[in-house]
Image (tube, rainbow, N blue to C red):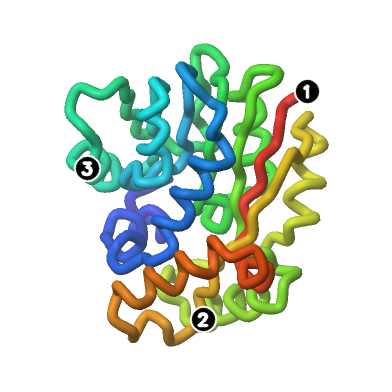
């Protein structure tokens, strides 16, 4: 991508990170979905500042963080513990080809922004060893709240480009084409327009409650899917 690309321009700012109450919820769910991954090689595609995958360091995992934004990687280097087994790679995730497959791959907060959702899922699968696990995330356009948010984001136009709209069923169907079978999923994310006007600690607490409550989470806009490669 060129430096003039609007996706890169958006992620080169802190707009995505500042006051983003959903990131801690995503990080917790990833840690729970991959709780049995220990002493393994983990790839985080579109890593941002590393918040989503950092908890996996506690299980003696080695992390490879890939992002096309040098500023995001700089934030990750500053936020993650010095001396930890982490490799930082600046690359477009659709172009990144690892030297050897990984035990687990994370692709969270990414599919809405890529040139092709299918190409991104194909890249995730190709980077994963047989029997390995991956976690994919989308704002589910088939859920009422997901549909509302997707259309609100498009109307608001903060990113200055059109976000991809994907349903959970579409995500799982594409994944199956590339040898990925769903093992579990988690829904979360209230994310109602206007919540950002609340004090940040209130918004974070609200999203944490929704994400941890089995009944409340069913109305959530976002869904995270754990899949295993055949």
Q: Which residue is mark 2?
A: 192
Mark 2 vs 3, N-terminal side? 3
**Element marked by disc 2:** loop
Mark 1 vs 3, N-terminal side? 3
**Element marked by disc 1:** loop
The quarter in which the C terminus is drawn is: top right
Q: Is residue 226 left or right of residue 62?
A: right
Of residues 36 and 24, the one drawn nearer to the viewer in this rendering: 36
Taking the spot 18% from the left edge, 41% from the top edge, the residue there is: 78
Neighbor class of circle 2 (other Cα within 10 Å; few <14, some 14-19, many 20+) is some
Q: Which residue is mark 3?
A: 79
| Residue 42, label in figure | none
Residue 71: x %, y % from top left: 24, 47
Residue 219: x %, y % from top left: 66, 73
| Residue 217 figure quarter | bottom right
The alpha-carbon separation of the residues under discs 1 and 2 comes to: 37 Å
Residue 197: x %, y % from top left: 34, 85
Neighbor class of circle 3 (other Cα within 10 Å; few <14, some 14-19, many 20+) is few
Q: Which residue is mark 1?
A: 230
Neighbor class of circle 1 (other Cα within 10 Å; few <14, some 14-19, many 20+) is some
Of residues 13 and 105, the one drawn nearer to the viewer in this rendering: 105
């Amino acid at each position: 991508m060129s430096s003039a690309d609007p996706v890169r321009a958006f992620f080169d700012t802190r707009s995505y990170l500042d006051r983003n109450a959903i990131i801690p919820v995503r990080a917790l769910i990833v840690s729970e979905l991959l709780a049995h991954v220990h002493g393994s090689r983990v790839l985080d595609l579109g890593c941002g500042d590393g918040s989503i995958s950092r908890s996996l360091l506690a299980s003696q995992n080695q992390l490879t963080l890939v992002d096309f934004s040098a500023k995001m990687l700089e934030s990750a280097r500053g936020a993650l513990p010095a001396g930890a087994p982490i490799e930082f790679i600046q690359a477009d995730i659709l172009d990144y080809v690892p030297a050897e497959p990984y035990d687990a791959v994370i692709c969270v907060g990414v599919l809405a922004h890529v040139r092709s959702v299918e190409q991104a899922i194909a890249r995730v699968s190709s980077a994963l060893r047989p029997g390995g696990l991956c976690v994919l995330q989308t704002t589910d356009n088939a859920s009422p709240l997901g549909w509302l948010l997707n259309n609100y984001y498009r109307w608001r136009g903060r990113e200055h480009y059109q976000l991809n709209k994907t349903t959970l069923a579409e995500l799982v169907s594409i994944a199956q084409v590339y040898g990925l079978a769903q093992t579990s999923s988690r829904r979360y994310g209230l994310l109602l327009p206007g919540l950002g006007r609340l004090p940040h600690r209130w918004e974070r607490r609200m999203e944490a409650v929704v994400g941890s409550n089995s009944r409340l989470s069913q109305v959530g806009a976002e869904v995270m899917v754990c899949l295993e490669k055949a």
